[in-house]
């Protein structure tokens, strides 16, 4: 963007852009955000808001075609502002796109070697993962521990009571049904944990010959379907606190959260759905039936072929998914005679976002840093 002209009063600077738009900036905001108030190496602030003068005004503004030189009432020394300062930094993350069983061809899928060796391939894969919340890597060596190598390219593994890396395979009389050979309906993991893990990776080391197919659904697409078709149920699911709990010899975890979580703008930001760990939902008698009706509406939608994507992953495949958006499950298999072995781990979205930003051009990353 190019500046056409500037104007100022003691309290306000107005920048007129060549495209006809304009932007106004308060004098205190400008004084606070001068580059000299940040460390030149880390980019972090050196002063606190309490250090700012209560009043500060603009006394002189000069535009030389490259920078604005602004003099404030509290000092005779002009402060230089490059043009890019006046363009607010954007969070360079792709917008999310809802997906359905019929549109899974858009999900990112590349070979591990391309992801690992090609920055452009990694950027495209991360872009798609952030957009859809579900992505696949193929030809990841199916050896125990390889998952941690992949995870380290995406952020920091979040250790839980299950460990840093956990095995998902058949165990007689398991403490968690994930270690049985039963089919598992669609769910999100660990809604009883605070906070809920943001990302899960699952690496297939061995696949059963019969059964064991993986199931996925975009919970955000399901939620929007309910919002448009059963708005009363949608509202109940966003407003009712639901208790979740997991107990074992090692831990006792408990949390309450709505099945559909909205942000302050009413946008769906998380799905919490796990039929294995939900606890009795004690509500006033007048609200109980409405909750069950809404809960049932959500369950029916999650069993609809419109939303459920079934795929038979093979040894060497790795799937990454947003645990607060994408529900996952599996078909049953004969664990005692036809083994199925996966390794999994949890990460958080801040690491994913950081990994994506680091694949962007350096100038854009400098804008983000500023």
Image (spheres, helix red, strand yellow):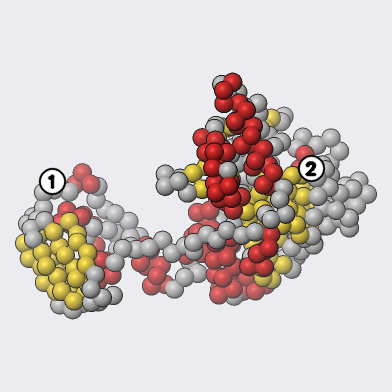
Residue 313 placement, left or right of 301: right
Residue drawn at (79%, 42%) of the image:
179
Of helix, strand and loop, which one carries label 2? helix
- Residue 250 lies, with reference to residue 166, above or below; the image says above
Residue drawn at (25%, 66%) of the image:
86
Q: Position of residue 7 (x, y in %)?
A: 11, 67
Residue 150 placement, left or right of 25: right
Residue 135 placement, left or right of 155: right
Viewer-proximal residue, 21 or 247? 21
* Residue position marked by numbered label 1 in the rendering: 54
Query: Which quadrant, please, contains the C terminus?
Result: bottom left
Residue drawn at (75%, 37%) of the image:
176
The reply to whether dot 2 and dot 1 touch (C-beta < 8 Å) is: no
* Residue position marked by numbered label 2 in the rendering: 179
- Residue 361 lies, with reference to residue 281, above or below; the image says below
Q: Position of residue 124 (x, y in %)?
A: 56, 70
Q: Position of residue 180 (x, y in %)?
A: 82, 42
């Amino acid at each position: 963007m190019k500046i056409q002209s500037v104007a100022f009063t003691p309290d306000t600077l107005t920048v007129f852009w060549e495209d006809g738009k304009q932007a106004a900036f308060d004098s205190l905001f400008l004084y606070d955000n001068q580059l000299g108030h940040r460390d030149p190496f880390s980019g972090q602030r050196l002063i606190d808001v309490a250090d700012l003068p209560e009043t500060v005004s603009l006394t002189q503004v000069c535009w030389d075609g490259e920078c604005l030189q602004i003099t404030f009432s509290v000092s005779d020394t002009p402060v230089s502002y490059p043009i890019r300062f006046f363009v607010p930094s954007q969070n360079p993350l792709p917008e999310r796109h809802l997906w359905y069983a019929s549109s899974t061809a858009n999900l990112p899928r590349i070979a591990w070697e391309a992801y690992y060796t090609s920055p452009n391939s990694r950027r495209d894969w991360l872009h798609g993962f952030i957009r859809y919340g579900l992505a696949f890597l193929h030809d990841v060596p199916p050896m125990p521990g390889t998952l941690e190598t992949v995870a380290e390219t995406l952020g920091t593994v979040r250790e839980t009571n299950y460990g840093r890396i956990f095995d998902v395979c058949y165990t007689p009389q398991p403490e968690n049904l994930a270690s049985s050979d039963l089919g598992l309906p669609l769910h999100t993991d660990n809604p009883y944990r605070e906070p809920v893990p943001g990302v899960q990776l699952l690496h297939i080391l061995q696949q059963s010959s019969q059964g064991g197919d993986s199931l996925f659904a975009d919970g955000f697409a399901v939620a929007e379907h309910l919002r448009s078709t059963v708005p009363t149920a949608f509202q109940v699911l966003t407003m009712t606190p639901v208790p979740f709990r997991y107990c074992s010899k090692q831990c006792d975890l408990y949390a309450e959260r709505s099945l559909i979580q909205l942000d302050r703008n009413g946008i769906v930001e998380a799905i919490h759905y796990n039929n294995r760990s939900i606890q009795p939902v004690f509500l006033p008698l007048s609200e109980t039936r409405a909750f069950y009706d809404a809960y049932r509406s959500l369950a029916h939608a999650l069993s609809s072929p419109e939303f459920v994507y079934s795929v038979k992953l093979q040894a060497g495949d790795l799937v990454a998914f947003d645990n607060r958006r994408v529900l996952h499950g599996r078909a049953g298999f004969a664990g005692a005679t036809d083994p199925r072995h996966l390794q999994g781990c949890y990460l958080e979205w801040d690491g994913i976002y950081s990994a994506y930003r680091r694949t962007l051009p350096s100038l854009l990353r400098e804008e983000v840093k500023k």
